[in-house]
Image: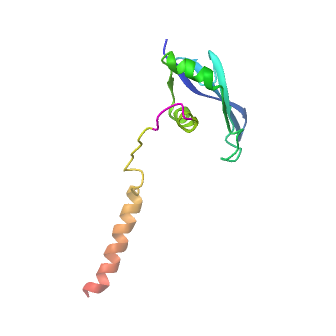
């Protein structure tokens, strides 16, 4: 059984509240889970202690059992010092989109045209 440490959404529409759970990877996002490990409330300020709450001992237990955290939970674990910080590099993220490139090229051509006359 492949175990993941992931977020299970709760709360009402536009008022999210997440539980950090250890769950079988084949189960639905908000479905059956093995154990609740903590909570995450994205509506609280980033410096608030209550924004992310985790039972560190149980998280370490599940990591020791081979559970794989999702990307978001891995970031929480890095902030808590339970996991080494992964190097993230996405050079395409800062690159403008296709339409923005076309607009920039058109703007450059337009600026160059009067100079050529």
Check the image and name the residue furthest to the bottom. 117
Viewer-proximal residue among 25 and 45: 45
Report the colour scheme.
rainbow
Query: Who is closer to the viewer here, 15 or 55?
Result: 55
Q: Residue furthest top?
A: 1
Classify residue 93 as left or right of residue 22: left
Q: Is residue 52 above or below residue 103?
A: above
The reply to whether residue 68 is visible in this rendering is: yes
Asked whether the viewer can see residue 32, the reply is no
Q: Position of residue 22 (x, y in %)?
A: 59, 20
Q: Nearer the viewer, residue 88 or 77?
A: 77
Quarter of the image for residue 24 reads: top right
Is 65 on the left or on the right of 113, as rendered? right
Image position of 99 with respect to 54: above or below: below
Across and down, in percent, residue 85 comes to 46, 38
Is 94 covered by the magenta stretch? no
Instruction: Give the x, y percent position of residue 39.
Output: 68, 31
Up/down of 30 relative to 109, above or below: above
Identify the main secondary structure in magenta: loop
The percent coordinates of residue 46 (x first, y second) are 65, 47
Looking at the rendering, which quadrant does residue 10 occupy?
top right
* Residue at 70% from the left image edge and 40% from the top image edge: 49
Instruction: Please state, as top left, top right, bottom left or bottom right, where the C terminus lies in the image.
Output: bottom left
Q: Which residues are magenta?
A: 81-85
């Amino acid at each position: 059984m492949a175990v993941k440490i992931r977020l299970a959404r709760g709360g009402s529409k536009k008022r999210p509240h997440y539980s950090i759970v250890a769950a079988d990877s084949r189960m639905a996002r908000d479905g059956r889970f093995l154990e609740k490990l903590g909570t995450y409330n994205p509506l609280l300020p980033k410096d608030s202690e209550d924004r992310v709450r985790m039972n560190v001992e149980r998280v370490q237990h599940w990591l020791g059992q081979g559970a794989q955290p999702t990307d978001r939970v891995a970031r929480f674990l890095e902030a808590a010092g339970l996991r080494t910080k992964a190097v993230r590099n996405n050079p395409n993220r800062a690159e403008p989109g296709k339409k923005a490139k076309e607009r920039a090229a058109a703007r450059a051509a337009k600026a160059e045209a009067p100079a050529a006359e």
